[in-house]
Image: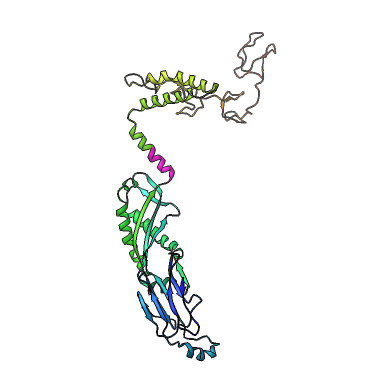
Amino acid sequence: MNRFDGGLFLENIEWFDESGKELVHRLPEQGSGEIKFGAQLTVRESQAAVLFYKGKACDCFGPGRYTLRTGNLPLLTKILSIPWRGDSPLRAEMYMVNLKYFPNLKWGTQNPVAFRDNELGLIRLRAHGMYNFQVVQPVLFINSLVGTMGKMDTDGIADYLKMVIVSRFNDYLGQTLDSIFDLPGTFDTLSDELQTRLADDFSHFGLRLSHLYITSITPPDEVQSAIDDKSRMGLIQDMDKFLQLKAAMAMEKAATTQGEAGAGLGMGMGLMLPGLFAGGRMPAAQAGGQPVAVPMVKCPDCASDISADARFCPVCGHQLLLLARCNTCGKNLTPKARFCSQCGEAADRKPQPTRCPGCNAENLPDSMYCNECGARLSASGLK
């Protein structure tokens, strides 16, 4: 609320901030006016008033009641301003500045910032906090930020101040912090040193950053999950007993499940428990810590010794897992192959029966002897 009584009478100038968010308020609100000689100005303890006359900041007033002396006389001004349609060219306006602390303003990173952690590597962090500020140089603040606006509140400057804080915070965090594991117990130190760095940025506009707090610095959800998993693993001293406990809990939960599915699951877990409690968790280990010998086979192509469960020979690359075989040369085929990589025949080509050159009897493909006359057939067979 404000009072500015114009017209032919003297003005009584005062201002009340009902919202609690206004930094500066101009009187009169509709541009400049004709503040009369002898107008009364009342300034509260939490305010300052800056008089602009003929386009210049003439004086700044602290708390108290003042009688203003301008070039505007109530009746004479109206007569002399006739060439300007009654609008006096002696323009004047009063800017009322709120000097109280503006608390609980929020700041935070809109997007995660990259941070190179010594233990976790390159991660992204989010940070949030709050700050308080105060106008300490009214004339500088009006000339640098307010200009000719009728009023300015905290919403009009909070976004800019938040960007300044986040920018300084990014540089400061990268220079001082080694790992996010060092954060507990250091928030007060980080807040004080960051506030010191921001003092010049605020004073450039006539503001003072009175308090700054960092409330949280958090990594993304997936990094937090990894940290939680690492902490839980550190608490587990005996993995075998932990797995046995989890299996017993799963069996108990399955036993409480109603229906045939729950009964079947409980029975399956019951069959698994003896093996788990017997200590046979890893089939590759025996009592005494001696590893079990892995069965070996010969590669059909290069005759190298390879593991029986290998899918390819590590020496020649021969495919050991038989998915399909060429009907012409017997080469193993890859899945969905249309032609053989060995002989070039179509993968779906059916083998032709072998004819005996003596009795012309039909024999199975690749037969070595005729099943009718017993004559020896050629090594490749006669199609």
Q: Nearer the viewer, residue 334 or 369?
A: 334
Q: Nearer the viewer, residue 331 or 184?
A: 184
Q: Kindly indicate the quadrant of the structure image that contains residue 238.
A: top left
Residue placed at 58% from the left, 25% from the top?
Answer: 324
For the C terminus, the image quarter is: top right
Q: Nearer the viewer, residue 372 or 160?
A: 160
Q: Kindly indicate the quadrant of the structure image that contains residue 146.
A: bottom left
Q: Is residue 223 magenta?
A: yes
Residue 248 percent coordinates (x, y): 42, 23
Q: Is residue 238 left or right of residue 344?
A: left
The residue at the far top in this view is: 373
- Does residue 147 appear in the picture of this structure? no
The residue at the far right in this view is: 360
Residue 199 percent coordinates (x, y): 33, 64
Residue 237 percent coordinates (x, y): 32, 30
Q: Is residue 47 left or right of residue 347?
A: left
The span shown in magenta is 220-228
Residue 221 percent coordinates (x, y): 43, 44
Q: Is residue 267 above or below residue 120?
A: above
Q: Is residue 258 magenta?
A: no
Residue placed at 38% from the left, 50% from the top?
Answer: 216
- Does residue 115 appear in the picture of this structure? yes
